[in-house]
């Protein structure tokens, strides 16, 4: 019996809701039109936000440390501290004011150098009101990372390490060249005590070739020892990421309909309260 009563109550409530919408159909249409109009106004007068990204690689930085470095940048953007932000990114204050967000995302890959070191590839995504900022922002971000104290120390350590290895390789190559020259001049033979070390010139040539390959790899590593190498530059895209016409209009229409339904709901509640008071009276 209670189930049948519940079904009747729900049906009655649904019928009342349909009647309320029918009686206020014109108001419903007006709410939809006004909401869509407000969304269109928002789209027309809200400034365009452009988005671009640069990709850097580093065998010094990790993703977590890179994010921690940029924490201060993100805080300065939220605080609208244009003086500090323009200083650390080497931008004008008007350019710094255009930056609305900076986000980082990293991936790891094996390096192609001799030690197979793990490199971090970091994608830096920036949202800006100024679509001409990218050429100035890219070197500013690179300089900001390189000027970090921890990064500068690690770079100096790497340079010292590779320079030391290159010196040792040059010393070994010099010794091998001297040994090769002695063999070619006949100063080392199978009967000599020293001749037991290296008698075959091809063996020495192979060792020299191997060391030269290592030397080239270390030289390349020394040249790329800087904390940041840009592998993907910022690109100025003509189409902004926001605001979007469809999203703005649909959002405005949804807001208008929600406001209308809220008004109808409150009106119905007031009516029920009034009827209840009359019945109690």
Image: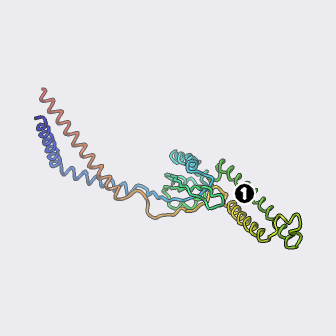
Place of residue 144 in the rendered image (x, y in percent of width and height, measured from the top left): 61, 52
Could you say which is closer to the camera, residue 101 or residue 216?
Answer: 216
Residue 266 versus residue 132 in the image, above or below: above
Residue 131 versus residue 60 in the image, above or below: below
Place of residue 173 in the rendered image (x, y in percent of width and height, measured from the top left): 79, 64
At mark 1, the secondary structure is helix
- Residue at 20% of width from left, 40% of height from top? 267
Asked which quadrant contains residue 184, the reply is: bottom right
Could you say which is closer to the camera, residue 187 or residue 143?
Answer: 187
Asked which quadrant contains residue 265, the reply is: top left
Place of residue 227 in the rendered image (x, y in percent of width and height, measured from the top left): 64, 55
Q: Could you tell whether 257 is left or right of 62 in the image? A: left
Could you say which is closer to the camera, residue 113 or residue 24?
Answer: 113
Q: Could you tell whether 158 is left or right of 80 in the image? A: right
User: What residue is shown with label 1?
Assistant: 162
Q: Could you tell whether 142 is left or right of 237 in the image? A: right
Asked which quadrant contains residue 57, the reply is: bottom right
């Amino acid at each position: 019996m209670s189930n049948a009563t519940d079904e009747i109550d729900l049906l009655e409530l649904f019928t009342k809701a349909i009647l309320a919408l029918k009686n206020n159909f014109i108001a419903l249409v007006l709410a939809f039109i006004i909401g869509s109009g407000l969304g269109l106004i928002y789209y027309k007068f809200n400034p365009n936000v452009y988005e671009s990204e640069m990709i850097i690689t580093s065998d010094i930085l990790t993703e977590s440390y890179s994010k921690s470095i940029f924490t201060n940048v993100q805080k300065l953007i939220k605080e609208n501290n244009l003086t500090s932000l323009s200083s650390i990114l080497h931008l004008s204050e008007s350019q710094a004011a255009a930056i609305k967000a900076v986000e980082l995302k990293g991936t790891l890959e094996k390096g192609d150098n001799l030690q197979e070191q793990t490199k971090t590839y970091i994608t830096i995504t920036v949202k800006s009101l100024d679509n001409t900022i990218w050429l100035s922002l890219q070197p500013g971000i690179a300089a900001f990372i390189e000027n970090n104290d921890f990064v500068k120390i690690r770079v100096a350590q790497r340079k010292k390490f590779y320079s030391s290895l290159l010196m040792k390789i040059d010393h070994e190559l010099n010794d091998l060249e001297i040994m090769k020259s002695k063999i070619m001049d006949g100063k080392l033979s199978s009967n000599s005590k020293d001749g037991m070390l290296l008698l075959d010139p091809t063996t020495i040539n192979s060792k020299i070739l191997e060391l030269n390959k290592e030397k080239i790899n270390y030289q390349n590593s020394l040249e790329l020892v800087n904390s940041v190498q840009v592998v993907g530059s910022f690109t100025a895209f003509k189409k902004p990421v926001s605001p979007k016409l469809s999203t703005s209009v649909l959002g405005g229409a949804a807001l208008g309909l929600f406001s209308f339904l809220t008004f109808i709901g409150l009106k119905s509640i007031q009516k029920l309260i009034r009827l209840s008071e009359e019945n109690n009276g």
